[in-house]
Image (spheres, helix red, strand yellow):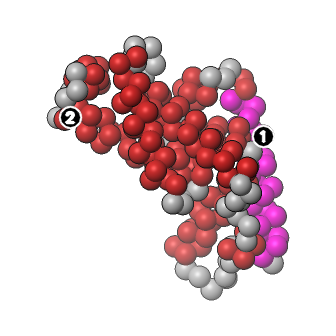
Amino acid sequence: MTQPEDEIIRRAKQGHEDALKKIIEIYEHKVAATVIGILGNGPEVDDIGQETFVQFFRSLPRFRGESQVGTYITRIAINLSLNELKRRKRHAKLLDENLAENVRISRNRSDQESAADIKNMIRQGLQQLQPEFKAVIVLRLINGYSTRETAEILSLAQGTVLSRLARGQAKLRQIIADMIKHKS
């Protein structure tokens, strides 16, 4: 079923279950990558992913197509993820309490294991970034959105996106360097 997006949306607005399923099929990986990128891999990820689509489907009658569906859905996922971060902060449930204990790099590991360690450090480093930097890095570097698309999703100027990307990358590099230093 490779219908154009506007036809799928039209059918979804009419309540056709196959169109609703197709929207989930098309965007579930992007939503998951966005939520995991912002929150890390945890028990809330599935709930927020599902809530993203629930909110999208509820808002579907009001969706006018002024932005792309993927952009609209990603914005919902970001908002829900940022709300979860705020909830965690209020309840003082930080994900990376034992960061130093979780990162162990061994010189005897294979290249594959080392690559997994690096990915793990990047994920853990992302969790330490402020939400405004994390959102830009996840959208630009992990999800592959352009600067223009990222600006549209986050309702920011493109210059702000570029600035936050540069500052976020610098902070992330420092966090990872500190992790490595503490391991030595």
**Residue 151's quadrant in the figure?**
top right
Look at the picture and state if 101 lies above or below 94: below
Where residue 10 appears, x then y in whole percent?
25, 19
- Residue at horizontal 72 percent and vertical 23 percent from the top: 159
- Residue at horizontal 23 percent and vertical 31 percent from the top: 19
Amino acid type, residue under disc 2 in the picture: Glu
Q: Are marks 2 and 1 in contact (CB under 8 Å)?
A: no
Rate crowding at label 1 as few (under 14), some (14 to 19) or many (20 or more) other CA atoms within 10 Å: some
The overriding secondary structure of the stretch rendered in magenta is helix
The residue under label 2 is: 17
Element carrying mark 1: helix
In terms of sequence position, does the residue under pointer 2 or pointer 1 come before the other? 2
Element carrying mark 2: helix
- Magenta-tinted stretch: 161-183
Look at the picture and state if 10 lies above or below 184: above
- Residue at horizontal 38 percent and vertical 28 percent from the top: 58
162 or 135, which lies in front? 135
Residue 172 sits inside the magenta stretch: yes
